[in-house]
Amino acid sequence: MPIASHSYSSKSHYKIVLISVYMGKLPFWMPAFMLSCSLNPDMQWFIYTDIPEPPYCPNNVKFIPTDLFELNQRASKALGMKIEIQPDCTYKICDLKPAFGMIFKEDIQSFDFWGHGDLDVVWGDIFHFINTEILSTHDIITSRIQRISGHFCLFRNAPEVNSTYKWIPRITKMIQDRKHYAVDEGHITDYLYVHNNPNWVVKVKQALFGKQEIRPRVYWEKDLTTSGAHQRAMGHGIERCWWWKNGKTYNSDGREVMYLHFHNIKKTMKKINFTYGDQPHEFMITRQGIVGL
């Protein structure tokens, strides 16, 4: 049965769902993640997980019970190939991200766009950066310049766009192999870059065989999130930390970004001083953790 969508405000007339698949133990920063989601009521989040839903879950965040066996079964059926992600390598799930539109097809029927997103982020004002004009004129929208981002990428919910992953060279081998190939970032980027900037080989193929492969319109003109440089610029206390303030996010130079991605600092982050249901108006993210004020 398709999953019912929630109501949306007037900020965007497009219905958009971000999908995360996460197995194991929820990270300690989830209260901050959930709070940042709640301030984006136009967006819906589906989290497929074997973890129980935490308390005070916002209306626009839905935890959908799924274990690894069920995920493998569902992906195998949807993609027509044997998927066998192992418990000791759940990071392999990232290779399935470009195919989420097919794997979770029944659940996302009511949405105009679906996307894949990670949990090691804090969201800012998403629709300040992804506006109606961008959504109406593009089929794929990513948060990196000329690169598909694994932590945020939107796809128009249309059959020809949802099947983009099929055209990635060697995709069947990479998805079925137990090794992680970074399909969601490197390989799909390579495919989309070539077909949005065709070389002579691609042009000859298209001339000889016609348009056998789709060429989705990709928005990758701006960096919308923190980079490795922003992480390196952080101080070791509260100096040059990142901020979430009333639904907006700011990186180490004070510039507003669409969301904060923790990158490697999550290896040193250890604590958060608020919990589910708390609603601080602002909090800082340092190398040590998250502090609500």
Image: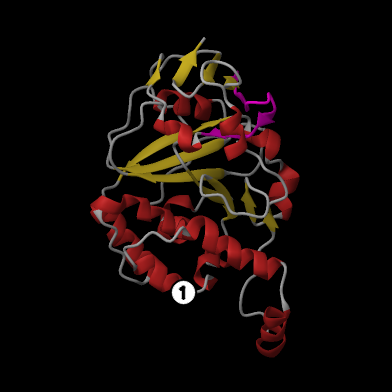
| Residue occupying image coordinates x 45% and y 29% | 59
Q: Amino acid at mark 1?
A: Arg
The single residue placed furthest to the bottom in the displayed view is: 208
Q: How is the image coloured?
A: secondary structure
Locate residue 141, reporting x and y percent.
Answer: 64, 51
| Residue occupying image coordinates x 29% and y 47% | 66
Vertical side of 45 occupied by 88: above or below: below
The residue carrying pointer 1 sits among few (fewer than 14), some (14 to 19) or many (20 or more) residues within 10 Å by Cα, namely few
Query: In the image, which residues are magenta?
Result: 245-261
Quadrant in the picture for residue 215: bottom right
Say left or right for 176 vs 231. Answer: left
Which of these two is toward me, 187 or 247? 187
Locate residue 170, reporting x and y percent.
Answer: 46, 74
Q: How many marks?
A: 1
Say left or right for 256 vs 120. Answer: right
The secondary structure type at the circle numbered 1 is loop
| Residue occupying image coordinates x 67% and y 43% | 223
Say left or right for 61 vs 85. Answer: right
Question: Is 33 part of what is drawn in magenta?
Answer: no
Locate residue 69, reporting x and y percent.
Answer: 24, 55
Q: Do we see residue 227 in this rendering?
A: no
Q: Do we see residue 177 in this rendering?
A: yes
Which residue bears the numbered disc 1? 170
Question: Is 249 part of what is drawn in magenta?
Answer: yes
| Residue occupying image coordinates x 29% and y 58% | 85
Which of these two is toward me, 62 or 193? 193
Locate residue 53, reporting x and y percent.
Answer: 32, 32
Vertical side of 235 occupied by 257: above or below: below
